[in-house]
Image (cartoon, rainbow, N blue to C red):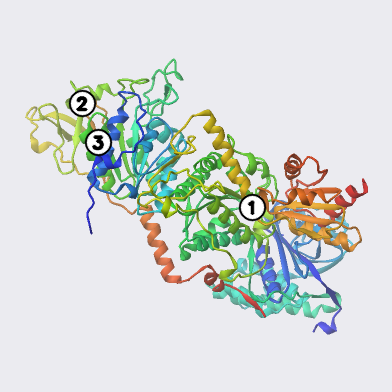
């Protein structure tokens, strides 16, 4: 089939599905992603959905989008789309800015009637002209073709219309030469309990695929390169699920049961959903009465001997501050997950930002240091959730895991690890020989970590609390000198974690004189930008931080090698300020964006180029 | 199984008790030590979790696992503790400010969930540790440092909150009545689910004598009634007063007067599912009707911690995954060779 058509071979393509928030764009996008990952593509997704559950149909505020990049060398969902699917005029209007020059737009022309145009606030009856679109527009009668395909199905009109997204998916599958069998399998799983709906969607996806075949003369198709991935079993995973699974892996490796105390909050709730399902692995996930009870129940569970976690987003982290301070003082292991979103206050609940860094580092009363780590990508959420647990348990401290809406909701193909790929986590239990003389704040002298006595253990009954403790006996103490000693001990304990984390790696052209620095969920965009700059002869090195506090031990050494250090982040410069305070001799430049959206690769290249030209 | 025997001394820690001399908390602490010895649950199988306030210092004086946490959060912390380690017997200690003001939300939800906690509410109607502000149980018009002209708000009646939150266990005692306190603490510990025990406690420094109307020896027998399941509701120095039903309400009568006989006096049923009469009894305040002490309501129900354990066991048996990897491989995957 492809031989007969105009085929473009690309190393990666970007497809953006857009429609009404009730149109099923997320489902169509997800299936396309899974099918692509199944044929060996790298994938990276970006669901871009409104805060409103159902805004008025056809309105600009109700547009939901799902962008995915598939192919090789894929680290981001792409700046701009090669193909844009717009199910109605509002979707077209909101998304045309994401189309690459030379890209193709596919619209459901049946939903471009006068009334539809009005809902999307078009002033004329020529939407393409009004938007100044010069790209190729393929006008597909999606609605009428879907209705025709299901004429005999006996389904009511509403159910028929719900299949439009799958017609579009069928067309896109044809465009990219994706096997329908695989898509059918995904649909079958999705509608396992509704066989009639599955049958309808199976018919419609075939109709969409066939329609593409029949119009092949008028549009190019794409052949996308596949990656030779590391052998193994793979699955598609988003960051929030990866986070949940990383916690479970840590629980298995630590031999401590997993407890989650949480409260629903966008965009972190999927972690609660996933762990609530995992009673099948013995996980206890409790939906508490508020954010404070979320962290407090986790603190109670930690004292009781579980691997305890609370999950939230920025506003929830604010509410948990006092509880986290208690965990700092009681020196209990605790993992706090903040899936960052736009702030302050309620802010932009469904959008991404890196604006909670200072809150994570400093947002508590008193001197209350704790560890902060931040995953770089959706799949890295698994590894860093595991690391957060390892550090918490082995160093008896709260650890904040800073993910964000972009990597939390975004997905990638992920190789399912073998059980032995992750190290054992060794809780710092009270050694048998110390039991007779043990006091609750006795520490390992090397690490400053206190020992963990699990309630129920005979001979280890002890009392913890938020009041300052005597360094030796653990009894309440208001002695001024002792207090200062305890403050510095708690700080030292966190600082010494630096000996237990990997060194900072330099990627791209390590010999260049300019170092791009990032942290957390921006890895894909920064790495792609650095690679593209090197390809274009503008040499740069790139270092990405996943360990924020403490920093990797070699950070100063790395920075000293570069003339320029440019910190790019999705806030007004919090990490740059943090680094500048720690390394005053390094000249740090900044690239910042605070729009609730991820970086575009182009923005980073432009920003870095400009700073490099400044000399 | 070998039965361990403990004395009150086994539950005492080596810390010197720092409450003010004459504080009602001393008596409550002693009653708690004795109740625990009566129960015979090992100190290392017992946890005491408190919030912030004078009474919340209590865990330091226990030779059990203990956690002196933050203001208002004891119920939430105790909830996580019990779910995580259901083998432990968990006591949660709060004062009226800690439990019903800053911690009100956690209090009602712990009761609603019916998690197996023994929740002690030490009610002295004042903030003692911050040196004398009115609390959510202070009477309207109460004069304190933060209400110099008297409060302009009505108080909570703890029992009413417990019933509003669908509580299954409510008992009451008075700090000076050590035997009654011990009796209700044992009953609370034996009850599976959230057991709320309100103890009227005197603050000698900031609210001395606040419960005198009830506790004064001269009037106590007339102004209180000790309820016991299955026994007649009688009170008074000579045991000649009784509670009878009068239409929709309760009424105190003298037995043998106005035609009332012992047959008319109600028999206490703490196990009755309906809380209608329990609520009537718990709301008696010592004025027209005697204040009730003892176990007022004690009804079995599904507990949060046990239901979680049960669900975990059921789902685990059904899915039968051996590990995380096993679970993931049962989902949608593909293989790269």
Graded by Cα atoms within 10 Å as few (under 14), some (14 to 19) or many (20 or more), the crowding at tag 1 reads: few
Looking at the image, residue A76 sits to the left or right of residue B280; the answer is right
Residue at which label 3 appears: B181
Query: Residue A248: percent from the left, percent from the top?
Result: 53, 61
Q: Is residue B287 visible?
A: no
Mark 2, other Cα within 10 Å: few <14 / some 14–19 / many ≥20: many
- Residue B329: name its quadrant: bottom right
Query: Element under label 1?
Result: helix
Q: Nearer the viewer, mark 2 or mark 3?
A: 3
Residue found at x 35% / y 54%: B87
Image quadrant containing the N terminus of chain A: bottom right
Spot occupied by residue A497 in the image (x, y as percentages of width and height): 61, 50
Q: Quadrant of residue A324?
A: top right
Residue A590 located left or right of residue B168 = right
Q: Would you say A541 lies left or right of A339 here?
A: right
Q: Which residue is mark 2?
A: B223
Q: Are marks 3 and 1 in contact (CB under 8 Å)?
A: no
* Badge number at residue A25: none
The residue that mark 1 highlights is: A499
Instruction: Look at the image and tell me whether residue B294 can be seen.
Output: yes
User: Can you name the residue that lies furthest to the front here?
Assistant: A433
Q: Chain of mark 3?
A: B
Same chain, marks 3 and 1?
no
Q: Secondary structure at mark 3?
A: helix
Q: CA–CA distance between discs 2 and 1?
A: 68 Å
| Circle 2 chain | B
For mark 2, give the secondary structure. Answer: helix
């Amino acid at each position: 089939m492809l031989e007969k058509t105009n085929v473009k071979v690309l190393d990666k393509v970007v497809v953006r599905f857009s429609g009404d928030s009730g149109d099923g764009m997320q489902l169509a996008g997800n299936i396309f992603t899974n099918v692509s990952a199944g044929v060996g593509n790298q994938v990276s997704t970006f669901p871009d959905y409104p805060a409103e559950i159902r805004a008025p149909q056809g309105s600009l505020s109700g547009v939901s989008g799902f962008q995915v990049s598939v192919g090789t060398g894929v680290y981001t969902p792409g700046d701009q789309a090669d193909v844009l699917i717009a199910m109605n005029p509002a979707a077209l209007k909101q998304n045309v800015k994401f189309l690459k020059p030379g890209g193709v737009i596919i619209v459901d022309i049946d939903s471009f009637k006068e009334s539809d145009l009005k809902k999307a606030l078009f002033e004329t009856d020529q939407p393409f002209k009004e938007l100044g679109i010069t790209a190729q527009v393929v006008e597909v009668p999606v609605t009428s073709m879907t209705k025709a395909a299901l004429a005999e199905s006996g389904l009511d009109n509403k159910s028929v219309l719900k299949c439009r997204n799958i017609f579009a998916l069928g067309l896109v599958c044809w465009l990219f030469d994706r096997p329908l069998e695989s898509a059918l399998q995904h649909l079958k799983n999705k509608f396992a309990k509704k066989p009639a709906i599955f049958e309808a969607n199976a018919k419609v996806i075939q109709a969409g695929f066939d329609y593409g075949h029949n119009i092949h003369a008028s549009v190019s198709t794409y052949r996308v390169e596949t990656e030779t991935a590391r052998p193994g079993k793979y699955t598609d995973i988003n960051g929030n699920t990866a986070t949940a699974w990383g916690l479970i892996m840590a629980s298995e490796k630590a031999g401590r049961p997993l407890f989650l105390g949480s409260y629903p909050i966008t965009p972190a709730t999927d972690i609660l959903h996933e762990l609530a399902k995992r009673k099948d692995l013995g996980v206890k996930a409790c939906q508490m009465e508020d954010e404070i009870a979320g962290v407090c129940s986790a603190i109670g569970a930690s004292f009781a001997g579980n691997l305890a976690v609370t999950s939230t987003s920025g506003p929830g982290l604010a509410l948990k501050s006092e509880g986290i301070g208690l965990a700092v003082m009681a020196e209990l292991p605790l993992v706090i997950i903040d899936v960052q979103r736009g702030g302050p206050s309620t802010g932009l609940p469904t959008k991404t930002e890196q604006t909670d860094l200072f809150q994570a580092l400093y947002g508590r009363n008193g001197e209350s240091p704790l560890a902060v780590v931040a995953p770089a990508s959706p799949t890295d959420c698994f590894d860093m959730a595991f690391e957060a647990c390892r550090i918490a348990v082995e160093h008896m401290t709260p650890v904040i895991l800073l993910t964000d809406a972009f990597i939390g909701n975004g997905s990638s193909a992920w190789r399912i690890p073998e059980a032995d790929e992750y190290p054992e986590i060794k809780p710092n239990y009270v050694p048998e020989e110390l039991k007779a003389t043990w006091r609750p704040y006795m520490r390992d002298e090397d690490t400053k970590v206190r020992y963990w006595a699990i309630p129920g253990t005979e001979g280890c009954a002890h009392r913890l609390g938020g009041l300052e403790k005597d360094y030796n006996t653990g009894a309440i103490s208001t002695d001024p000198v002792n207090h200062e000693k305890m403050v510095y001990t708690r700080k030292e304990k966190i600082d010494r974690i630096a000996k237990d984390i990997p060194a900072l790696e330099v990627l791209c052209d390590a010999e260049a004189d300019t170092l791009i620095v990032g942290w957390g969920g921006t890895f894909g965009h920064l790495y792609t930008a650095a690679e593209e700059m090197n390809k274009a002869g503008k040499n740069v090195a790139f270092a990405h931080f996943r360990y924020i506090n403490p920093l990797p031990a070699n950070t100063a050494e790395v920075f000293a090698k570069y003339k320029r250090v440019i910190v790019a982040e999705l806030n007004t410069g919090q990490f740059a300020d943090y680094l500048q305070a720690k390394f005053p001799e390094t000249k740090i430049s900044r690239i910042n964006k605070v729009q609730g959206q991820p970086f575009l690769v182009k923005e980073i290249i432009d920003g870095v180029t400009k700073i490099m030209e400044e000399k | 199984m070998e039965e361990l025997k403990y004395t009150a001394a086994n539950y005492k820690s080596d810390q010197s008790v720092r409450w003010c001399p004459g504080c009602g908390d001393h008596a409550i602490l002693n009653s708690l030590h004795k109740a625990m010895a009566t129960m015979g649950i090992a100190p290392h199988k017992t946890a005491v979790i408190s919030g912030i306030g004078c009474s919340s210092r209590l865990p330091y004086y226990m030779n059990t696992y203990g956690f002196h946490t933050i203001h208002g959060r004891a119920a939430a912390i105790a909830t996580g503790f019990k779910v995580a380690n259901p083998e432990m017997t968990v006591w949660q200690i709060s004062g009226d400010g800690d439990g019903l003001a800053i911690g009100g939300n956690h209090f009602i939800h712990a009761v609603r969930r019916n998690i197996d906690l023994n929740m002690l509410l030490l009610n002295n109607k004042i903030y003692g540790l911050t040196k004398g502000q009115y609390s959510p149980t202070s009477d309207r018009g109460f004069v304190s440092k933060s209400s110099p002209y008297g409060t302009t708000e009505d108080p909570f009646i703890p029992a009413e909150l417990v019933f509003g939150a669908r509580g299954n266990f409510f008992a009451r005692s008075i700090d000076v009545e050590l035997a009654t306190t011990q009796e209700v603490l044992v009953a609370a510990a034996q009850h599976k689910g959230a057991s709320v025990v309100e103890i009227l406690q005197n603050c000698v420094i900031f609210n001395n004598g606040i419960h005198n109307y009830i506790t004064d020896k001269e009037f106590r027998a007339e102004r209180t009634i000790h309820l016991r399941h299955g026994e007649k509701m009688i009170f008074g120095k000579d045991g000649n007063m009784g509670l009878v039903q009068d239409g929709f309400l309760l009424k105190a009568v003298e037995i043998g007067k106005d035609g009332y006989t012992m047959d008319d006096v109600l028999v206490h049923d703490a196990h009755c599912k309906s809380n209608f009469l329990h609520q009537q009894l718990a709301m008696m305040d010592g004025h027209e009707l005697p204040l009730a002490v003892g176990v007022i309501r004690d009804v079995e129900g599904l507990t949060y911690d046990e239901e979680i354990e049960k669900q975990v066991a059921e789902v685990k048996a059904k899915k039968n995954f051996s590990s995380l990897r096993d679970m993931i491989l049962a989902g949608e995957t593909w293989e790269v060779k």
